[in-house]
Amino acid sequence: MSDEFRLGWAEWVSLSSLGLPAIKAKIDTGARTSALHAVAIEPFGSASNPQVRFIMHPDPDDPHIEVVCSARVIGRRSVVSSNGESESRYVIETPITIGDLSWPIEITLTNRDNMGYRMLLGRSAIDELSHINPSESFLQPELSYDVYKKRRKKNPTRRPLRIGILTHEPGNYSNRKMIEAAEVRGHVIECIETGRCYMAINEHSPAVHYDGQALPRYDAIIPRIGTRMTFYGMAVVRQFEMMGTYCLNSAAAIGASRDKLLAHQMLAQHKLGMPNTAFAMSSRDTDGIIDLAGGSPVVVKLLSSTQGKGVVLAETRKAASALVEAFRGLRAHFLVQEFVKEASGTDIRLLVVDGKVVGSIQRTAQAGEFRSNLHQGGKAEKIKTTTEERRTAIKAAKILGLNVAGVDMLRSNSGPKILEVNSSPGLQGIETATGKDIAGAIIQSIEANVRSVIRSK
């Protein structure tokens, strides 16, 4: 380091890789080890990839500012404090910046709530600095705690995250790919089976329990909730939201997308194109319902249909009337929709992540079938979409509040018509057809949106 570099007994420092752009540190050459204030210290990860997550209060005068930090653990160290007490601490390594210089240092984590400075810089971190003046302070440029009060749209810090996938099929393709994508980027990720969760709902310490134990704090949750688990799954997602965990799709957004009637009403309110649709349960005006959808042929679908199940094409008015009568006899909620002939058994899916279309495919129904869902034997191929189609998909996801969405639409003579917006789109078909790393894009979205700086209440 430069001989001109001078330090006083206290300086402003930055630990940017931990999301701490400004901290006042006391420099103590009498102490060998550097220390950083940390509470709620929680190890996670595997033996081959040990990590630690902790909360830091950078401003001693404002304990409501909390920064969630995480880093790889490089060891444990027994440290004897000034009062003679020994403490075993986690040791991490991180770059430090003072003035114009940056270099890596080792830091131990400990609770410094009763100390005037949130960080102690020991001699092992500054051995190469020959100009330390114990009678002066803040010789390097001044920083400010105001940086923690500015609202950022995106998280500027990449740190190891603890991520949970809320699912009932831990081993399926989508989950495996997201686990691979997260681990490649240094995160720890695990599947949580939705049905095995139960919740402690209270004002002070809401928690999600799993197989007899409270789940640890997660930085992010990826909801992959099956349709049969929608009600309970949404309750679990809401519980994580109460705990301050970032959820890729919120419970409210999942609920809006799963309620086909509500989704259609919300999209129609914003003037997005959809097939003409009628909704009914017990009305006896069968002809009127069919006419609202534009007359036969029509598609009749249960409100709870998914993956093409519970969706039937009625090619004649007589067949349509019989279907409507049958659903009415079951006292089931159902939609009657216009059949868009020019689509010719094909639809397109645009996968939206964080307000951008990251992949598009055309799905074609197998011979003798009008449903193009891949679960019904449809085939997928990569396609080029129009600006109008991309804008429609992005707007639909935004209206429903979804950060990740599969938007299914038909190409009609009057423009794109939305069929459905899926809050848990499968990745296998679209990744295989496009060759794109959709799972990686989802993990990058989580990195950008997980908040590190929190103002506690």
Image (cartoon, rainbow, N blue to C red):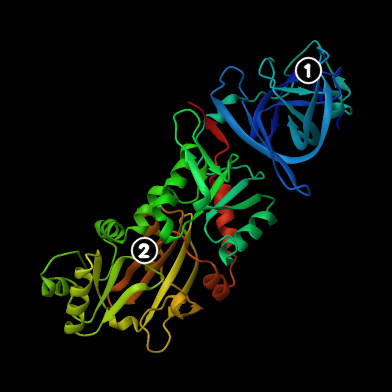
Q: Give x and y (percent) for residue 401.
A: 39, 51
> Where 126 falls versus 74 (above or below)?
above
**Residue extending furthest toward the bottom:** 367
User: Which residue position is annotated with label 1?
Assistant: 8
Q: Give x and y (percent) for residue 251.
A: 41, 48
> In the image, which disc is placed on residue 155?
none
Q: Is residue 192 left or right of residue 127?
A: left
Q: Residue at x 31, y 83 (%)?
A: 342
Residue type of the residue flagged with mark 2: Thr
Question: What element does badge 2 sit on?
Answer: helix
User: Which residue position is annotated with label 2?
Assistant: 392
Residue type of the residue flagged with mark 1: Gly
Q: Residue at x 58, y 17 (%)?
A: 61
Q: Residue 419 occupies which quadrant of the picture?
A: bottom left
- Which quadrant of the rendered structure holds the N terminus? top right
Mark positioned earlier in the residue sequence (2 or 1): 1
Q: Is residue 36 left or right of residue 384?
A: right
> Where 120 falls versus 428 (above or below)?
above
Q: Is residue 348 left or right of residue 300?
A: right
- The reply to whether dot 2 and dot 1 touch (C-beta < 8 Å) is no
Q: Residue 73 occupies which quadrant of the picture?
A: top right
Q: Residue at x 25, y 68 (%)?
A: 335
Q: Give x and y (percent) for residue 432.
A: 57, 74
> Where 39 falls versus 435 (above or below)?
above
Q: Nearer the viewer, residue 81 or 450?
A: 81
| Mark 1 Cα shell of 10 Å, populated few (<14), some (14-19), many (≥20) | some
Callout count: 2
> Where 303 falls versus 400 (above or below)?
below
Q: Nearer the viewer, residue 26 or 407?
A: 407
| Mark 2 Cα shell of 10 Å, populated few (<14), some (14-19), many (≥20) | many
Q: Is residue 179 left or right of residue 34?
A: left
